[in-house]
Amino acid sequence: MKTIDVDVAIIGAGSAGLTARRGALKEGKSVLMIESGPYGTTCARVGCMPSKLLISAAEAAFHAEHSDVFGVRSTVVVDGPAVMERVRKERDRFAGGVVSSVDEIPENEKLRGHARFLSDTSLDVDGTKVQAKAVVIATGSSNWIPKQLQVLSKTLLTSDTIFEIPDLPRSMVVFGSGVIGLELGQAMHRLGVRVVVLDPMEGLGFLKDPEVRESAISILGKEFPLHLNADIQSVEETSDGAHVVWATKDGVVHEETFEKALVATGRRPNLGSLGLENTSVELDDKGIPKFDPRTMQIADLPIFIAGDANNQKALLHEAADEGHIAGSNAALFPNVRAGLRRTELMVVFTDPQIAVVGPGYSGFEAGEWEEGSIDYASQGRARVMAQNRGLVKIYGTRRCGFLAGAEMVGPRVEHTAHLLAWAVQSRMRVQQTLEMPFYHPVVEEGIRTALRDLAKALKMNELPCQGDDLRDGPGT
């Protein structure tokens, strides 16, 4: 058996694996990156980028079709094949950029094949032995299909396959009300596909705040059928499509046949075939290695885990951060150090958008925090755009009045969420955020209203947080 000796072996060449490589190289160590599948990250190939391309087409169709409110009349024709062709063309461009960067890696620093642990620091890669001083697991994740839905074949779509369809289907059932289900379900609906979203749970995206969640459910549910707490009684594939029988939470039974079924029930880490049983790694009750999120180290072992593989935060920016921390510490082992972990930031690109900053509603102990809010119904810029729907909640600590996080559904909250995330990470107090400039009229004025409400709840009204800024402008 051929043997390759290296300082750091990295299993996986996705977002986490690529940044792990850079982190290890920065410490002056030799690196071998191992990949068994196609090059190109999940984000670029089947995740964030192609989904946003489809969403952009859907937004164009929706706004053209609903321009009557502005006195603008139009007729909309959706060319399904053209929509999907552009999605794939631009997707391939994004993915190609990643592949090109991998192509530039010297051949002696990468290896094609399936890696399996022989011990804590040795791997078998299709007959080649890799002996490393430390290993980074960055194997990503795969779509998970519940047993009840495994009867589907020809009608089955996942985020891995939906962007390959040549044309838009006439109808589609979406199983799952998480990020993928909501984004792609709404996009397909806006492109003229008859869509029904089903989920046996009550969750919606990342939302935990019951009022924000109910606002989002109400808004999205008015646009397309959204059935949470649904009892999915039977699923079968017929010659006409996917036949589904379900009962809504009020007990009403529905029965429909759909041309396609998008299964968006989550992703699971790619760990099953790594041979972890041959290592000293201890798994939790879900089969995931126990690791330190500050260092990405598994116990005190020379094994690190980053990205989707650790089942924590399936987000590109988190995977990139984790990969860099894991790669650096693998190179420095045993002298590991805590890396920079940023304030949590999650966005769902529905319309209106959904976002969570920090730990969100469930991240605080009772009595430790207060909240401020704004309903976007009367927010000036939102009304100008005829997008005055949504609710923002901002949380602050009773002790010292630090900004702690937020949950929101509303127009363009991807931008609002970034401002709040920066403020949380900077350890800003509520009064400090209110001393920042707010232009008029912009949707970000809404967070100033919510911050004032939070300051009042924290009994900070007499503090400098109430500046001499514009209070009574139209729509502020």
Image (spheres, rainbow, N blue to C red):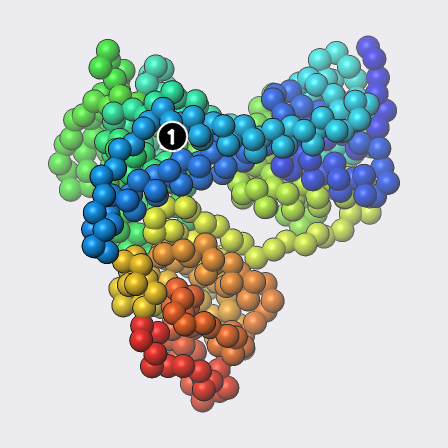
Q: In the image, what residue occupies the spot 42% across and 47% down?
A: 348
Report whether 418 appears left or right of 379: right
Asked whether the viewer can see residue 362, the reply is no
Give the left or right position of residue 296, taking residue 285 as reference: right
What residue is shown at x 65% (from left), y 46% (from top)?
321
Q: Residue furthest bottom?
A: 462
Q: Is residue 283 above or below residue 408?
A: above
State which quarter of the image contains the C terminus.
bottom left
The quarter of the image holding the N terminus is: top right
Task: Please indicate whether residue 406 sits to the left or right of residue 387 in the image.
Answer: right
Residue 265 point in image, percent of width and height: 39, 33
Quarter-of-image position of residue 367: bottom left
User: Residue 285: percent from the left, percent from the top?
Assistant: 53, 36
Measuring 38% from the left and 27% from the top, which residue is drawn there? Answer: 82
Q: Residue 102 or 381: which is nearer the viewer? A: 381
Q: Can you identify the residue that label 1 sits on?
A: 83
In percent of width and height, residue 171 lies at: 25, 27
Graded by Cα atoms within 10 Å as few (under 14), some (14 to 19) or many (20 or more), the crowding at tag 1 reads some
Q: Please tell me how many numbered marks the rendered image carries.
A: 1
> Taking 395 as reference, is 261 above or below it?
above
Q: Secondary structure at mark 1?
A: helix
- The amino acid type of the residue labelled 1 equals Val
Q: Quadrant of residue 290?
A: top right
Q: 53 or 5, which lies in front?
A: 53
Residue at (43, 26) in percent of width and height = 85
Residue 20 can be seen in this image? yes
In this picture, residue 232 sits left or right of residue 358:
left
Work out which residue is located at the far left of the displayed protein and give it. Answer: 252
